[in-house]
Image (tube, rainbow, N blue to C red):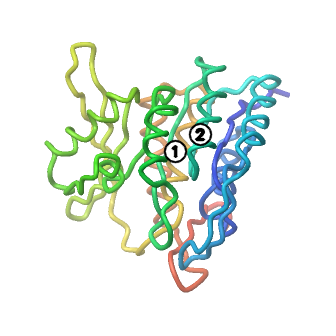
C-alpha cells in the first residue's frame, strides 16, 4: 500500500469543527493525505463567535513540531490561528529546521465576532518570524491591509497590489487574496512577483453563493492548498484546485446554530 503524503497542521482548536485544526484535518483527509497536528491555542466559540482564547504553552508547541519533523517526512505545512508572540517565535524556530518544506499561511487576525487573535505585537512577530518561511499566504481582502493599518477597498486594485508588496517585502513568496466581490462573482486574486520585480496577477472567479457568513472558509482554502502541494501539484495548480474546492463547500453550507453557517462536504450528505 502506498504511503499517503503527510501534511503538518499548526492551528487553533475550534470546537465547532468548521474551522481550526478540526476543519483542517477534514480537508486534508478528504484529499488522501495524512494529517499531523499541533494545537496553537484553545478557543471558546460557537457559530455566534469567539468568547475565549487560551494560547498553548510555547515550548510544548515547539517540542511537538520538532518531534514530528524530526521523525516524519512532512510534504507540506499549513499554519492557521496563532495567538501569542511566544508561540509565533517557537513556530518560526521550528520552521527554520525544514526550509525545504512548503508552508501555507492562513493569517487569521480576528474572528468575525469576538476578541482579536493577534495584536500589533503579534503581527510584528509574525512578520519577523513566520513570513520569510511562507510559500503562499491566503489573507482575505480585509486581512490584507491590517498589518499596515489600512482598510483596503475591494475595487481598488492599486491599493491591493500596494499592500501585497508589504507582504512580499517581509518574505512571502506568493499571495492569494480572497473574498473580492465583483457583482455576482467572488474573486480569489493570485499574486506573484516575476524575476524582474513585476507583479503577475491571476484572478480565479467563482459564483457568489448567497448563504451568508460561512465559518472556516479560509481554513478550507489554505488546508486544501497544502494538501494538493503535498500530493505533488505545482503551486498554481494547487491554488486553482483549492479555490474551486472552497467555492463548492461554501455553496453547501448549512446553519446548525444561530450564527454563521458551517461547510459540509457533498459526499457526507
Q: Where residue 4 appears, x then y in whole percent?
A: 75, 31
Q: Position of residue 81 (x, y in %)?
A: 57, 51
Q: Nearer the viewer, residue 195 or 164?
A: 164
Circle 2 Cα neighbour tier, 10 Å, few/some/many (<14 / 14–19 / ≥20):
many
Give the camera-side residue of 51 and 152: 51
x, y percentage for residue 133?
A: 51, 26
In the rendered view, tell whether residue 189 sits above or below residue 220: above
- 33 or 132: nearer the eye? 132
SS at mark 2 in the image: strand
> Mark 1 near mark 2, Cβ–Cβ under 8 Å?
yes
Position of 259 relative to 237 (above/below): below
Q: Residue at image x 43%, y 41%?
A: 124
| Residue 177 position (above or below residue 256) | above
Instruction: Tell me which residue sits at (68%, 64%) in the image.
Output: 268
Which of the 4 image quarters holds residue 7?
A: top right
Instruction: Locate the C terminus by quadrant.
Output: bottom right
What numbered label is drawn on residue 222?
1
> Residue 78's mark?
2
For this orientation, the residue located farthest to the bottom is 258
Q: Is residue 51 left or right of residue 155?
A: right
Amino acid at each position: 500500500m502506498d504511503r499517503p503524503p503527510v501534511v503538518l497542521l499548526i492551528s487553533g482548536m475550534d470546537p465547532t469543527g468548521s474551522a481550526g485544526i478540526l476543519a483542517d484535518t477534514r480537508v486534508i483527509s478528504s484529499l488522501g493525505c495524512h494529517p499531523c497536528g499541533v494545537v496553537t491555542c484553545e478557543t471558546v466559540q460557537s457559530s455566534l463567535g469567539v468568547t475565549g482564547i487560551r494560547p498553548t504553552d510555547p515550548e510544548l508547541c515547539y517540542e511537538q513540531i520538532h518531534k514530528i519533523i524530526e521523525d516524519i517526512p512532512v510534504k507540506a505545512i499549513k499554519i492557521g490561528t496563532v495567538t501569542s508572540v511566544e508561540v509565533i517565535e517557537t513556530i518560526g524556530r521550528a520552521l527554520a529546521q525544514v526550509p525545504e518544506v512548503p508552508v501555507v499561511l492562513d493569517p487569521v487576525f480576528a474572528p468575525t465576532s469576538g476578541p482579536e487573535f493577534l495584536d500589533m505585537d503579534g503581527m510584528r512577530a509574525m512578520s519577523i518570524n513566520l513570513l520569510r518561511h511562507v510559500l503562499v499566504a491566503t489573507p482575505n481582502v480585509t486581512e490584507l491591509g491590517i498589518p499596515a493599518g489600512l482598510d483596503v477597498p475591494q475595487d481598488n486594485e492599486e491599493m491591493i497590489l500596494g499592500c501585497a508588496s508589504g507582504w512580499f517585502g517581509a518574505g512571502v513568496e506568493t499571495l492569494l487574496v480572497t473574498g473580492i466581490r465583483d457583482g455576482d462573482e467572488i474573486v480569489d486574486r493570485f499574486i506573484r512577483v516575476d524575476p524582474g520585480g513585476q507583479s503577475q496577477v491571476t484572478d480565479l472567479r467563482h459564483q457568489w453563493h448567497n448563504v451568508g457568513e460561512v465559518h472556516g472558509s479560509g481554513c478550507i482554502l489554505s488546508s486544501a492548498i497544502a494538501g494538493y502541494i503535498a500530493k505533488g501539484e505545482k503551486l498554481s495548480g494547487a491554488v486553482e484546485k483549492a479555490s474551486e474546492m472552497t467555492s463548492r463547500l461554501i455553496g453547501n453550507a448549512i446553519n446548525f446554530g444561530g450564527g454563521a453557517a458551517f461547510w459540509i462536504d457533498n459526499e457526507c450528505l
